[in-house]
Image: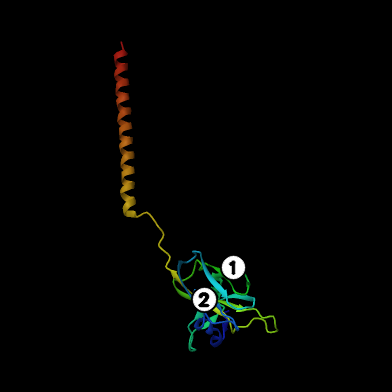
Amino acid sequence: MVHLLPAAALFWFLLHCSHVLGQGGVSITPTRIPLSLAAGDPAIVEVTLINGSEEPLRLRPQVLELLDGEEPGPGLSASERCLWVEPESGELSLAPRASQTFTFRVRPAPEAAPGTYRFALAFIPVLEKTGGIAFTGGLASLLELEVLPTPPRAGISFVILLPAFSAVVLALLLAALTIRRARRRNGVEEVEVLREREP
């Protein structure tokens, strides 16, 4: 079941990808990642998170798909296609004034239809207070994944195969004919030898 999350709150991720978290300057780079893959092919993408604040941060990565809906702007969904994008871990800790690279493994399903799919590679602050994960104040990078058409399987053309097959058959026929002639000659020579030996 596709679960649509509030588009108004989460679309903020993409409009303000380098927005500050709280009072400090926490940002993500790159803000947009174009990627082209054939269905079933794997790849790794990297983002760098920079904590410019004086406070340590705990962030939880989350992958959300952008869907075009009837509301103004796209909606974000925790769809089944989000399983194509796997974060390296379930949480990230950022020390004050530090940066860290975080990776996502991308692999569209082998049966994925060709087309462009957009995902928010989001990082949401983990709050110690009651209320758990907050959806406001997060930041994200936009992954634009183009799934390419599956190339046709390489095969031997019948046009190429037919002359090769004909050449093999012709060579076998010539070999059989040569052997037959050789046997006949040997037979004739044997008969002539026997006749000469007869009294």
| Residue position marked by numbered label 2 in the rendering | 141
Residue found 31% across the figure and 13% down from its top: 197
Q: Based on the displayed image, in which of its 4 quarters is residue 115 positioned?
A: bottom left
Taking depth in this image into account, of 75 and 9 the one nearest to the observer is 9
Taking depth in this image into account, of 191 and 182 the one nearest to the observer is 182
Residue found 61% across the figure and 69% down from its top: 89
Whole-percent x and y of residue 1? 58, 79
**SS for tag 1?**
loop
Residue found 52% across the figure and 80% down from its top: 18
Whole-percent x and y of residue 170? 30, 42
Whole-percent x and y of residue 125? 62, 79
* Disc 2 from disc 1: Cα separation: 15 Å
In the rendered structure, the answer to whether residue 84 lies left or right of residue 192 reads: right
**SS for tag 2?**
strand
In the rendered structure, which amino acid carries the disc numbered 2? Ser
In the rendered structure, which amino acid carries the disc numbered 1? Glu
| Residue position marked by numbered label 1 in the rendering | 88
Q: Earlier in the sequence, mark 2 or mark 1?
A: 1
Crowd class of label 1 (few under 14; some 14 to 19; many from 20; radius 10 Å) = few
In the rendered structure, the answer to whether residue 38 lies left or right of residue 27 reads: left
In the rendered structure, the answer to whether residue 126 lies left or right of residue 19 reads: right
Crowd class of label 2 (few under 14; some 14 to 19; many from 20; radius 10 Å) = many
Whole-percent x and y of residue 165? 34, 47
